[in-house]
Image (spheres, rainbow, N blue to C red):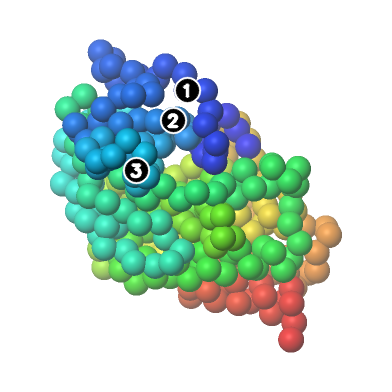
Amino acid sequence: MTANNIKLNSDYITPTTMTNKENTPPLTVGTLIANKYRLLALLGKGENGQVWKAEHSTVRTHENEVVPLFALKFIADNAKYEHCEQAEIRQSYKRTIGLKHRNICTFHPLEEDEQHGYVFVMEYVPGETLWKYLNTKSLKKLEFAEVVQILMPIADALDYIHKRELVHRDIRQENIMIAHDGEPQIIDFGLAVQMQNGTASMGMGRGKTGTTLYKAPEQWLGFPLDAKTDQYALGVVAYELLSGALPFEDEEPYFMSLRVPYMPVLPISEISDSVNAVLAKAMAKEGKARFDACRDFIDALTHEVLPS
């Protein structure tokens, strides 16, 4: 993983002083956001923004009362102040609030802070990200059965949002939370964008289209995005969990833009040709060559990994 990727931790990490924009006060523990949410701890930061744990500042009525916790996503600088896209942010986020799925974290109304701009408010899910889950166990990869167990519900959740004309655009280990009960959830819809007639143009979505190591060929080439874009990223996660490595990895986005759209994905030597074929189909260069749905991808993987 590169330092640019957001790492969401289940525990507090020491927050550094970070400023979203020149002359904007830094986000620190205790900062009051939108006169409503008080920041408690930095959970993660990266190329697409930063996420903080927060509590509602007006809910507590008794000193020892347990109050609900939230995860607040602040959009990165270069994605936040493009006024022509503010209506799109609000429209896409309204659709996000309406999502009701056991494997998608709950979203609360969009907030706008005078100093820090738009703030995405999400349910705080106790647990750890898939990335942290692997690192806590000192693992680089997982057994086939566990990969399927984690990714099957995620595939169902992705198909659910695609039917509602949304593309997540940022599926990766750090945006899959393993809750304390073991149930995986998709978190952080900060880059989600609404599809129109089945696709989303590259001009939509605040200029950011995903995290470098998980972006599909169409994202690098500036082509319209659709549900198959999320399937590609899910394929990258599956490849990563089965091999312990990414299909393409380079610190420089320029070189990734030359490799991902044109170079074939190398097969994983430790697994069968049939499983490699399933992964290659999910990560095909053109969306039309991928599976019809994310669940179809995981079903095919299940058939090859755990034949009946």
Mark 2, secondary structure of its residue: strand
Q: Residues within 10 Å of mark 2 (few under 14, many from 20)?
A: some
Residue type (three-letter) at the residue carrying disc 1? Pro
263 displayed left or right of 164 = right
Residue type (three-letter) at the residue carrying disc 3? Glu
Residue 229 seen in the current view = no
Q: Residues within 10 Å of mark 3 (few under 14, many from 20)?
A: few
Mark 3, secondary structure of its residue: loop
Q: Nearer the viewer, mark 2 or mark 3?
A: 3
Placement of 273 over or under 190, stated as above or below: below
Task: Give the residue pinned by disc 2.
Answer: 41
Q: How many marks?
A: 3
Task: Give the residue pinned by disc 3.
Answer: 65
Q: Give the numbered dot on residue 15.
A: 1
Q: 277 or 102, which is in the foreground? A: 102
Q: CA distance from mark 1 to mark 2?
A: 7 Å
Q: Earlier in the sequence, mark 2 or mark 3?
A: 2
Q: Quadrant of residue 234?
A: bottom right
Q: Give the numbered dot on residue 236.
A: none
Residue type (three-letter) at the residue carrying disc 2? Ala
160 displayed left or right of 156 = left
Q: Quadrant of residue 38?
A: top left
Residue 109 seen in the current view = yes
